[in-house]
């Protein structure tokens, strides 16, 4: 059973749900019949908390955290061969791999729980003004799980009833029909969910989150006009705005204040319910940002490095968009309190020595989400963000540009993100862009702003750019770094250092196969009606 981590989940839920081998054939095992269980509102809340639980999977080596999904893209790679994320960008994944199995089971478990909850509450033996809201939360979660499934697998069985034994071996439902059900669930959720909750209910689904997911779903389907409208509806709620400090947005100390931007999150509690994920991973760092990602960050004049006169190949990390230094540790910068002055008198005074276990194979490490004050992994309690207002602005800019062209409102949305980052506005750096040129900048802005937040994988696939970007992962030659030395001032400026680009991971992308994951083999074996995705 997936480890119980959702902050709102009560221990009593242990008696309600557990995993099962076939998520399409029956209710979760050990389920207490709601006919005998739902006698009051407290019991309904406990049952609903079990639906939330499936938002996150905590398996150690086959990770489904947003930051680990990034290692299957051109933004990062995982140098640890025992982690199942490594095989996918190399074109080695198959129907027996752990990742599709976990993704399939996690989502269908959530869907099964949502179906049980929706049906049981509809016939509950008590009344409460909160019941419509509870159903709205469950319908949002069902929509969320189905959105995740179609993003990774395409057509999937659409199951809306608990324990539907009359259709125990369902066919895959066309993606378009699943999308229609997702949007139906979201509309019903929007109608019943509140705009906000009391502080002690942080993490529950709001009206804004449902509206935000609607904008994402429509964007992913290329329904540009409706996607733009859905994003604008969120903006017009006047409930969300950008937290003023981009780097601080991802620190635990600011999580409550950042509620102005965070539209959906999964909560953690240090010591009691730590997240572990963002604490340094010792001498085996499992997350290495690529040079491709580093190069995608703009200069502080608002231009890409290929067009900016401020770019210096000898000091490539200077004069960059502030989101660069907020997101990445890089050669020449201070790595918290682990980087020390070199004791060797023969070494230049401006050299810096670092313990080898802090090195990463690409020369970069993730700084985003990283709290340098922690000394123990169990102290890590940073929430995982699933949706924030910055994404809504990017959804709006992309959809509006595709439907109407690079009108002023498109520039305004991107400029808002750059204003928060304290860098040059797009309207100043690149005015009068064509629709095609604006598309390029919006896509790159999305990559930079949302780095390591789990959305790049879907973006690569919906834009059909896998062949272009899923090439060999690049990094910096860190031979001298492995000896513990490189020259620098701790602020990013390097002296007498030659940056050499190397290949750190050989990758393959087959466009006839790799835009989708395979249906898990056990599901294929159990259901003769299931058709496998091409190439598997």
Image: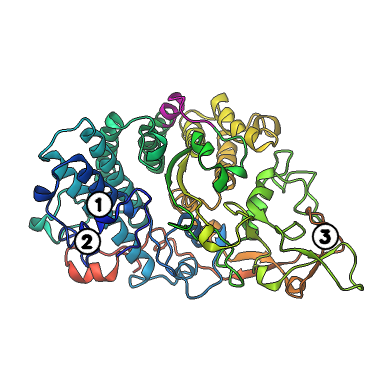
Q: Is residue 355 left or right of residue 343?
A: left
**Is residue 116 in view from this perspective?**
yes
Say which label, 1 or 2, has the lower sequence index: 2
Using the numbered discs, state the Cα–Cα distance from disc 1 to disc 2 in whole angstroms. Answer: 9 Å
Say which label, 3 or 1, has the lower sequence index: 1
Q: Residue at x 59, y 47 (%)?
A: 448
Using the numbered discs, state the Cα–Cα distance from disc 3 to disc 1 in whole angstroms. Answer: 52 Å
Q: Answer above or below: position of 396 versus 162.
A: above
Residue position marked by numbered label 2 in the rendering: 23
Using the numbered discs, state the Cα–Cα distance from disc 3 to disc 2 in whole angstroms. Answer: 55 Å
Q: Which residues, given as a range, are shown in magenta?
A: 231-241
Q: Residue at x 69, y 44 (%)?
A: 322
Residue position marked by numbered label 3 in the rendering: 488
Crowdedness of circle 2 by 10 Å Cα count: few (<14), some, many (20+)?
many
Residue 111 numbered tag = 1
Q: Assess whether mark 1 and mark 3 are in contact (beta carbons under 8 angstroms).
A: no
Q: Within the magenta stretch, is there residue 206? A: no
Q: Assess whether mark 2 and mark 1 are in contact (beta carbons under 8 angstroms).
A: yes
Residue 75 locus on image (x, y percent):
57, 57
Q: Secondary structure at mark 3?
A: loop
Q: Answer above or below: position of 475 versus 309.
A: below
The quadrant holding residue 249 is top right
């Amino acid at each position: 059973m997936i480890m119980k981590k959702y902050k709102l989940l009560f221990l009593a839920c242990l008696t309600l749900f557990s995993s099962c081998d076939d998520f399409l054939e029956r209710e979760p095992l050990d389920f207490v019949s709601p006919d005998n269980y739902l006698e009051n509102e407290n019991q309904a809340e406990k049952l609903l908390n079990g639906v939330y639980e499936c938002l996150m999977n905590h398996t150690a080596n086959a990770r489904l955290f947003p930051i680990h999904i990034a290692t299957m893209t051109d933004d990062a790679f995982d140098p640890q061969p025992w982690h199942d994320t490594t095989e996918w960008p190399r074109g080695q994944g198959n129907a027996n791999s752990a990742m599709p199995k976990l993704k399939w089971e996690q989502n269908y478990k959530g869907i099964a729980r949502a179906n049980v909850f929706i049906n049981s509450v509809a016939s509950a033996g008590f009344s409460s003004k909160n019941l419509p809201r509870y159903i709205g939360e469950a319908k949002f979660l069902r929509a969320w799980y189905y959105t995740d499934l179609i993003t990774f697998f395409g057509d999937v069985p659409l199951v809306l009833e608990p324990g539907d034994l009359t259709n125990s071996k369902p066919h895959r439902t066309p993606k378009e029909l699943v999308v229609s059900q997702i949007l139906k669930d979201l509309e019903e959720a929007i109608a019943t969910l509140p705009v906000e909750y009391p502080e002690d209910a942080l993490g529950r689904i709001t009206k804004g989150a449902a509206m935000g997911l609607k904008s994402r779903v429509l964007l992913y389907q290329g329904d540009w006009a409706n996607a733009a409208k859905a994003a604008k509806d969120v903006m017009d709620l006047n409930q969300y705005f950008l937290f003023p400090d981009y780097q601080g947005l991802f620190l635990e100390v600011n999580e409550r204040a950042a509620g102005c931007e965070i539209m959906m999150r999964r909560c953690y509690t240090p010591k009691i319910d730590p997240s572990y994920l963002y604490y340094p991973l010792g001498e085996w760092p499992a997350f290495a940002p690529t040079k491709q990602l580093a190069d995608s960050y703009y200069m502080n004049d608002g231009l890409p490095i290929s067009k900016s006169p401020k770019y210096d190949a000898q000091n490539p990390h200077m004069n960059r968009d502030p989101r660069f230094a907020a997101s990445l540790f890089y050669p020449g910068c201070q790595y918290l309190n682990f980087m020390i002055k070199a004791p060797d008198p023969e070494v230049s005074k401006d050299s810096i020595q670092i313990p080898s276990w802090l090195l990463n194979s690409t020369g970069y490490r993730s700084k985003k989400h990283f709290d340098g004050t922690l000394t123990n992994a169990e102290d890590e309690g940073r929430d995982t963000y699933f949706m924030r207002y910055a994404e809504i602005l990017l959804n709006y800019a992309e959809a509006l540009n595709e439907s109407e062209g690079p009108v002023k409102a498109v520039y305004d949305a991107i400029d808002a993100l750059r204003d928060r980052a304290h860098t040059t506005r797009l309207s100043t750096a690149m005015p009068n862009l064509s629709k095609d040129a604006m598309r390029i900048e919006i896509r790159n802005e999305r990559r930079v702003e949302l780095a390591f937040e789990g959305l790049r994988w879907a973006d690569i696939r919906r834009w059909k750019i896998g062949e272009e970007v899923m090439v060999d992962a690049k990094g910096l030659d860190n031979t001298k770094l492995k000896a513990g030395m490189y020259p620098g001032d701790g602020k990013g400026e390097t002296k007498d250092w030659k940056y050499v680009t190397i290949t750190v991971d050989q990758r393959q992308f087959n466009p006839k196969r790799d835009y989708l994951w395979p249906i898990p083999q056990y599901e294929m074996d159990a259901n003769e009606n299931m058709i496998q995705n091409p190439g598997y």
